[in-house]
Structures are given as C-alpha cells and as structure tokens.
Image (spheres, helix red, strand yellow):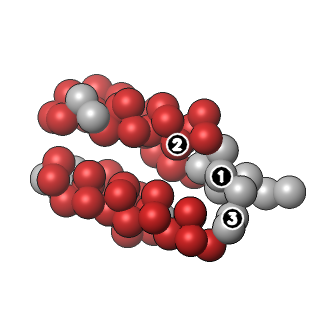
Amino acid sequence: MERLDLYLRLEYHTKDIAKEFQKLGNWLEKSGITENTRKMDRLKAILDKEESWKDHYFEALDCLRGVVQVI
C-alpha cells in the first residue's frame, strides 16, 4: 500500500501504478484483511482513466487511505 501511495505521489508511469494496484488487490485477498470495496472500486475506476487519473489525484489518495477497514 505504501508503494502505491508513493507511486501516485511521484506520478509514476500508469503501467507501474496499475501493477502495484494489482499487487495490492492480491495481497488484500490473500491476507484476509477486510477491505472497503467501495473505496477500492473507486480507486480502480480512477486509475483506469490512464493519464487523466491525475485530475483526481487527491480523491485517489483518499481512496487508497480508506481501502483497509479498521474494525
């Protein structure tokens, strides 16, 4: 999660961000940690916009911070 946050903040190439997003999804699935699917889905929708995700930069970071649900 931290790496994806860093990639977003440093505006890495879209392919690198997509790869890290996929890794995050796989990690969450394997770990059994409860995720906020609404935030995860919104983050995916933002990142699927290729280069225009930068227009939603702050929303993307907010979604990333809200992905893991603390119970």
Mark 2 Cα-neighbour bin, 10 Å: few <14, some 14–19, many ≥20: many
**Residue 52 vs residue 23: left or right?**
left
* Amino acid found under the numbered disc labelled 2: Met
> Which residue is outermost to the bottom?
31
Quadrant into which the C terminus falls: bottom right
Which residue position is annotated with label 2?
A: 40
Q: Earlier in the sequence, mark 2 or mark 1?
A: 1
- In what element is the residue under mark 1? loop
| Residue beneath the point at 38% across and 65% down | 23
Image coordinates for residue 46, horizontal then vertical, percent: 35, 32
Identify whether 37 is placed above or below 22: above
| Residue beneath the point at 41% across and 58% down | 5
Which label sits on residue 56?
none
The Cα–Cα distance between marks 2 and 3, rounded to whole angstroms, is 13 Å
* Amino acid found under the numbered disc labelled 3: Ile
**Residue 23 vs residue 40: left or right?**
left
Identify whether 1 is placed above or below 59: below
Mark 2 touches mark 1? (CB < 8 Å):
yes
Image coordinates for residue 25, horizontal then vertical, percent: 46, 58
The reply to whether residue 16 is visible in this rendering is yes
Which residue position is annotated with label 1?
A: 35
* Residue 48 occupies quadrant: top left
| Residue beneath the point at 26% across and 52% down | 18
